[in-house]
Amino acid sequence: MKRILFLSSLAIAVASVVLLMPAPKSKAMPAACTLTGFFRDGIEMTAAVSNPTSPVTGVVNATGCNIGVYYGPGTSGQVKGAEIFGANYFGVVANGDTDDINLDILNSNIHDIGESPHNGSQHGIGIYWRAFFAGGGVTGRIVGNTITAYQKGGIVTNGTGIQANISDNTVTGDGHVFFIAQNGIQIGYGASASVMRNNVSGNSYKGYPGDGSASGGVLVVGGAGYGTCPDGNDCPYTVNTKINDNVLANNDVGVYLSNVAGDGFSAPATATNIKAVNNTISDDQCFNTSYQAGVSDVGNNDKIINNKISGYAGCITVYNPSGVAIDADTSFTNRPKVHANK
């Protein structure tokens, strides 16, 4: 039996846990918040830094703002060696919906993004890139960053205009929690990305039997089964993602591949060609009651090869009653290639 992901608690929606040891904050004073013209949940977002014309370095205390650093359509820039914290919605946003953005986020520390304390509201993202409309896009690198103490997600890239190199980051969730399904790295709704050599851990939700909700270390999501995207069209499949050489620990699902057709449950008829290769995936306990697996696949011609997986076999849940470590049965996914996993 297979499930479509429970969107409101799993993937970062296209429209738009208790901290044990919060990251230390700099003593820098909060910045003044300015309006950005970017809306979320019906709110015009404010930012501590908006459309900067020089590289962002040093400390950005975004306490009281919705966003730490905001890049709007048609801008470009670099965040390098920065510390960004305190915003309740996003650490860094690149909004490429209507014009191109070129942005690198390098060797920065992004932490404490969300409400204080964290709650179940579906916001609080360390890095958020979006580009849903023709004529826009976001291209660049997210490399060498440390992202912790986020409420909902560490890194999210959504939309067909995204081209992202996401590598060598450390992304750490709140651990086993009862109030929100966090995700470490999300590639969504047609985004193009490589996810390489990241360390992603501690994204785990208790879940509720029957709703299909679970947290993902690396989540790839797309398809009309997830509804209409902001451009007014059915959400596209996310294809050709490379997920290689990552260390994924203590997430409900290490690699979560979910491309769902418009009927809400079928796998795509066309190839998605996602590769999950040479990852080390482990879990310390069977925590989620709804769903757990080392790798989960709903797609077409996805490759799951030479991954080292431990701690998932025998985790019996509502949507994985056999407790398999790699959940890629041909009753719910098409033509999976599963080889040489340990």
Image (cartoon, rainbow, N blue to C red):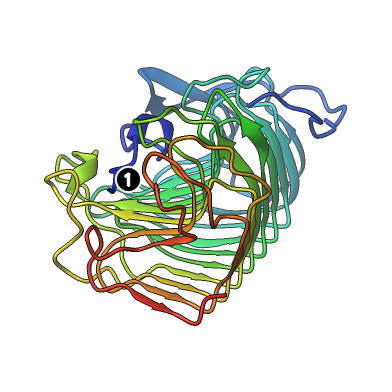
Residue 16 appears in the figure: no
Relative to 262, 34 lies left or right: right
The residue singled out by tag 1 in the image is 97
The amino acid type, in three-letter code, at marker 1 is Asp
Q: Residue furthest right?
A: 27
In this rendering, the answer to whether 63 lies above or below 4 is above
- Residue visible at 71% across and 32% down? 85
Q: Is residue 55 left or right of residue 122?
A: right
x and y percentages locating residue 295 in the rendered image: 46, 60
- Picture coordinates of residue 71, whole percent (x, y): 50, 43
Q: How many marks?
A: 1
Viewer-side residue, 135 vs 122: 122
Q: Residue at x 22, y 71 (%)?
A: 271
- As drawn, the residue found furthest toward the bottom would be 340
Number of other residues with Cα within 10 Å of mark 1, as a class: few under 14, some 14 to 19, many 20 or more: many
Of 237 and 306, the residue lying toward us: 306
The answer to whether one can see residue 23 in this image is yes
8 relative to 83, above or below: above
Q: Is 66 rendered above or below residue 317?
A: above
Q: Residue at x 18, y 43 (%)?
A: 264
Secondary-structure class at tag 1: loop
Pinpoint residue 164: horizontal percent, then vertical percent. 47, 62
Q: Which residue is nearer to you in this view: 146 or 184?
A: 184
Q: Residue 234 placed where, x, y %?
A: 15, 46
